[in-house]
Image (spheres, helix red, strand yellow):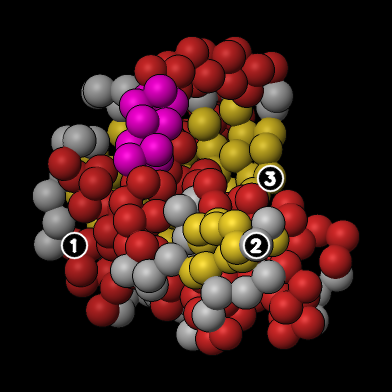
Amino acid sequence: MDTKILEHIGLTHNESIVYLTLIKEGTSKSGEILKNSGLNSGKIYEILESLKKKGLVSESVVNKIKHYTAASPSQILEYLNKQKEELEKDEQIIKKEIPKFEKIREKKTKEVKAITYTGFIGIKTAADEALESIKKGEEILGMGITERKDKRFNEFWIVWTEKRIKKKITAKHIFSEKRDYFDKFEKMKYTESKVLEGLTPVTIDIFGKDKVLILNYNEPFSCTMIYDENTATSFISFFYQLWKLAKE
């Protein structure tokens, strides 16, 4: 078994080495474990204690000398089940606290006029947060929407739009070209789409009355969320001027 597999489920690199050493060598004294594992003697007892707490190593005393035995590999599943139980408990605690955290963050966010997010995950985070914050009756306006970008973004926006539709939030889109991507959105509920060829090198989304998301799909990927009603009002006005010029 590769140490990376054990590290993936939560063991440290050294814990993984010690457990695998005991699996291979059988019941061993600490000195034998050190010799066979190649680890530093300074932390061997700390590692063994940690593995004992995880239920993956047992200890016995023979002739007043401690010996250590690896638990059955099936015990790894038991360890994972315990982790799941702990995570479920933590999840319930966090769920109760999230509304408090959101109130604090919302207050501070309003004080900040713009936040920049980087990378695919950053853009995904910004878009998800914007969707969560939009209120019933508000709409989303998007311009400069293009199929010509990393496929991950096209796939993400399709899934994201399905979540928007479930919330019954309406959206108007101005695409920069009429291709398959446009056709997919044209068939969606709560969605209106038009085309204005070669509109802009970036995409601009307006969420409700006070948020503007400016997206750059060229590497390095990034986006900036502007929290300002005056800015949003200006972009809304600009959007509807272009909407009149765009073709269905």
Q: Main secondary structure of the magenta part?
A: helix
Residue located at (40% from left, 47% from top): 83
Residue 226: tell me if it is visible: yes
Q: What secondary structure is found at the residue carrying circle 1?
A: helix
Which circle's residue, 2 or 1, is located before the other in the chain?
A: 2
CA–CA distance in space, label 3 to label 2: 65 Å
The crowd level at tag 1 (other Cα within 10 Å; few <14, some 14-19, many 20+) is: some
Q: Is residue 101 above or below residue 223?
A: above
CA–CA distance in space, label 3 to label 1: 30 Å
Front-most of residues 145 and 78: 78
CA–CA distance in space, label 2 to label 1: 79 Å
Front-most of residues 132 and 38: 38
User: Is residue 198 in the magenta section?
Assistant: no
Where are the magenta residues, as a range? Answer: 85-95
Report the amino acid beneath label 1: Glu
**Residue 14, quarter of picture:** bottom right
Q: What secondary structure is found at the residue carrying circle 2?
A: loop
Q: What secondary structure is found at the residue carrying circle 3?
A: strand
Q: Percent x, y for residue 244?
A: 34, 48
Q: Is residue 240 above or below residue 214?
A: above
Q: Percent x, y for residue 70?
A: 49, 69
Residue 243: tell me if it is visible: no
Question: What is the number of the mark on residue 186?
Answer: 1
